[in-house]
Amino acid sequence: MAKIIDGKKISAEIRQEIAQDVRRMKEAGIVPGLAVIIVGEDPASQIYVRNKGRACEEVGIHSEIIRLPEQTVQQALLSQIAELNARDDIHGILVQLPLPRHIDEGAVIAAISPDKDVDAFSEVNVGKIMIGNFRFLPCTPAGVMELLKRSGIETEGKRAVVVGRSNIVGKPQAMLLLHANATVTICHSRTRNLAELCREADILVVAIGRANFIKAEMVKPGAAVIDVGMNRLPDGKLAGDVDFAGVSEVAGYLTPVPGGVGPMTITMLLKNTVTAAEAAREKRERS
């Protein structure tokens, strides 16, 4: 029977550490600041943004939520980002995705200063992750790495398989596992012999967006299985990409949905914001 990795508990531990860091920074006269921009009324995005605001409050980070109407033109959004780029009291900028169709997501991400790109989506920060010289990490893959580390799951020399190749999770997840000295295979919708490859994994990270896709017979006995999926079933319940009931009988470690990777994502955003504030302080001291 798999040991369940409690993302809520690990997230709470990290938030306590972040709150201590924020207190120390405030004593030195620095208040980390995060600005979140949301365009439109998407219900899921509204919930995410509200949760981010609450999390900032919990650890003492100053947060501003900028709500723009659905019909906001791209140039107005870019102007708002430019204004935030110039503010010394805002260290992190996040634009909640998805954006309305008439706005070019790539142009918006590119407009955020790499020094304030706490989602680590910009080409600059993605490139730094590639070569291993990074300041910020994308929040979900960073959360996965913390779950592995704090659960005592060794990555060095292990065979890791990542199912999913998105720019937000799959690709950076593979790079972080590679930097942690795992031997990494990326699988996706066109992969042949997917089940066979998954069964070779000591660490299996699944981010494919298909409910209960990974079955027990696709998992190596004793493997660590990290389920990044979050799918809404017809009955309204949430399900991951992994068949929890079946896989829990085979895996050595398993994250639940909800309560596994999910709580870690916002926590790592808070950590990135504190990192950005520290970097801004160091930059000022050098200049």
Image (spheres, helix red, strand yellow):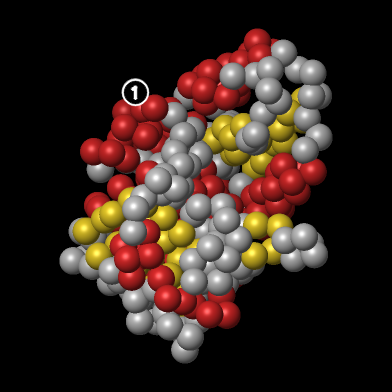
Image x and y of residue 106, in percent? 52, 23
Residue found at x 51% / y 43%: 273
Q: Mark 1 highlights which residue?
A: 287
Quarter of the picture containing the C terminus is: top left
Residue extending farthest top: 75
Residue extending farthest front: 192
Is residue 219 shown left or right of residue 16?
left
Residue found at x 67% / y 29%: 99
Q: Is residue 135 above or below residue 79?
A: below
**Tag count in the figure?**
1
Residue extending farthest left: 157
Is residue 90 shown left or right of residue 151?
right
The crowding category of the residue bearing disc 1, from other C-alpha atoms within 10 Å (few below 14, some 14 to 19, many at least 20), is few
Residue found at x 42% / y 80%: 251
Who is closer to the viewer here, 179 or 256?
256
Image x and y of residue 104, in percent? 59, 19
Dividing the picture into quadrants, the one containing residue 81 is top right
Dividing the picture into quadrants, the one containing residue 79 is top right
Q: Is residue 50 visible?
A: no
Dividing the picture into quadrants, the one containing residue 223 is bottom left
Residue type marked 1: Ser
Q: Is residue 102 visible?
A: yes
Q: Is residue 26 above or below residue 145?
A: above
Q: Is residue 60 above or below residue 132?
A: below
Label 1 secondary element: loop
Image x and y of residue 32, in percent? 55, 42
Residue found at x 40% / y 82%: 252
Q: Is residue 199 above or below residue 74?
A: below
Who is closer to the viewer here, 235 or 276?
235
Image x and y of residue 98, in percent? 65, 34
